[in-house]
Image (tube, helix red, strand yellow):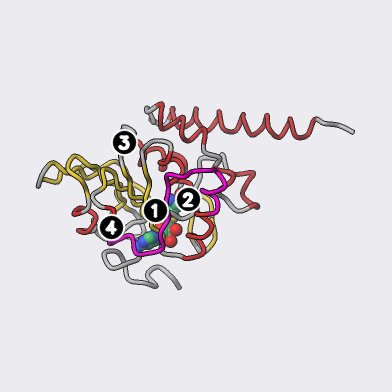
Amino acid sequence: MSHDSPNRDADERAAAIRSLIKELRTEGIRSDSVLQALQTVPRDQFVPPEYVAAAWRNTALPIGSGQTISQPYVVALMTEALELTGDETVLDVGTGSGYQAAVLAGLCRHVVGVERIPELVTGAREKLHALGLSNVEVHEGDGSLGWPDQAPFKGILVAAAGPRVPEALLKQLADGGRLVIPVGPPSQQVLMQYRREGETIHSRQLTGVRFVPLIGAEGWADGFGED
Ligand code: SAM
C-alpha cells in the first residue's frame, strides 16, 4: 500500500497556494499582511466540493444560490484598500461563503457580516465556526442599510455592486474610516474607496470590476438581474 497520495495532495495544494500568492504580488498586491491572510485562510473550505480542485486559482467560483466567491485578486485588493491596522471593527456586506470575512478576521479586531440569503448565512456561520474564528458574527439582513446596532465602523467592505454608494453606509463610517464598494450597472462597475474625515467624504476610483448586484433598499430592486 502506498502512502504517497496524501503527501502528494498536500504538496500540490502548497504549490498551488504559493503560485497564487506569487501571482497576486505580480498583479500589484503589496501588503504582506494581506498576502499572509490569503495564504493562511483555506479557500478550499469555502467552495462547494466540486470546486475544491479549482479553489487556489485566481478566479471567482460559484457558491450556490446563484452567487459567487470573489476572485482572490479582488479580495486582496479590497482588503488592502481598507488599510487595516488590527484594532478595527469591520462591516462585511455580502458575506456569501464567509471567505472574505475569514480573511478580514485575521487583520482586524472584529467582523460583522451581513448576508441576505439565509442558506448562505447558515453555511458561512458553519465554516467560520469550524475554523475557530470567534471574532466574526454573521447576520441575515439587507446590508445596503448597513448594521446600525454596531456602527460606526472603521472599515466597510461591500462585495456586491449597487447603483450608487448607499447613504446608510457613509453614515455608519467612523471618522477616518474607509468604505470599499463596487458602484455601477451590472455590466461594468468601478471599485471605489471612500474615506471619512469629519464631515467630509473623500472618494477614489481603484479599478474596473464586475460583481453580482447589491439587492436591497439602497441597492437594486429584488429580482434585478434574474430571468
Ligand atoms: N464575500 C463573499 C465571499 O467571500 O464568499 C462573496 C460575495 S458574493 C460576490 C456577493 C454576496 O452579496 C452574495 O452572497 C449576495 O447574496 C450578497 N448580497 C447581495 N445584496 C445584498 C444585501 N443587500 N445585503 C447583504 N448581502 C447581499
As shown in the figure, which amino acid type bears the numbered disc 3? Answer: Asp
As shown in the figure, which amino acid type bears the numbered disc 1? Answer: Gly
Q: Of the residues under marks 2 and 1, which one precedes in the sequence?
A: 2
Looking at the rendered structure, the secondary structure element under dot 3 is: loop
As shown in the figure, which amino acid type bears the numbered disc 4? Answer: Asp
Mark 1 crowd level (few <14, some 14–19, many ≥20, 10 Å Cα): many
Mark 3 crowd level (few <14, some 14–19, many ≥20, 10 Å Cα): few
**10 in relation to 103, above or below:** above
Judging depth in this view, the residue of 122 and 20 nearest the camera is: 122
Give the residue at mark 1.
113
Mark 4 crowd level (few <14, some 14–19, many ≥20, 10 Å Cα): few
Q: Nearer the viewer, mark 1 or mark 4?
A: 4
**75 in relation to 121, above or below:** above
Give the residue at mark 4.
149
As shown in the figure, which amino acid type bears the numbered disc 2? Answer: Gly
* Relative image position of residue 24 (x, y in whole percent): 45, 32
Give the residue at mark 3.
87
Give the residue at mark 2.
98
Query: How far apart in space, not on screen, are marks 3 and 1 (Cα)?
Result: 17 Å
In the drawing, does residue 127 fall left or right of residue 194?
Answer: right
Query: How far apart in space, not on screen, are marks 3 and 4 (Cα)?
Result: 19 Å
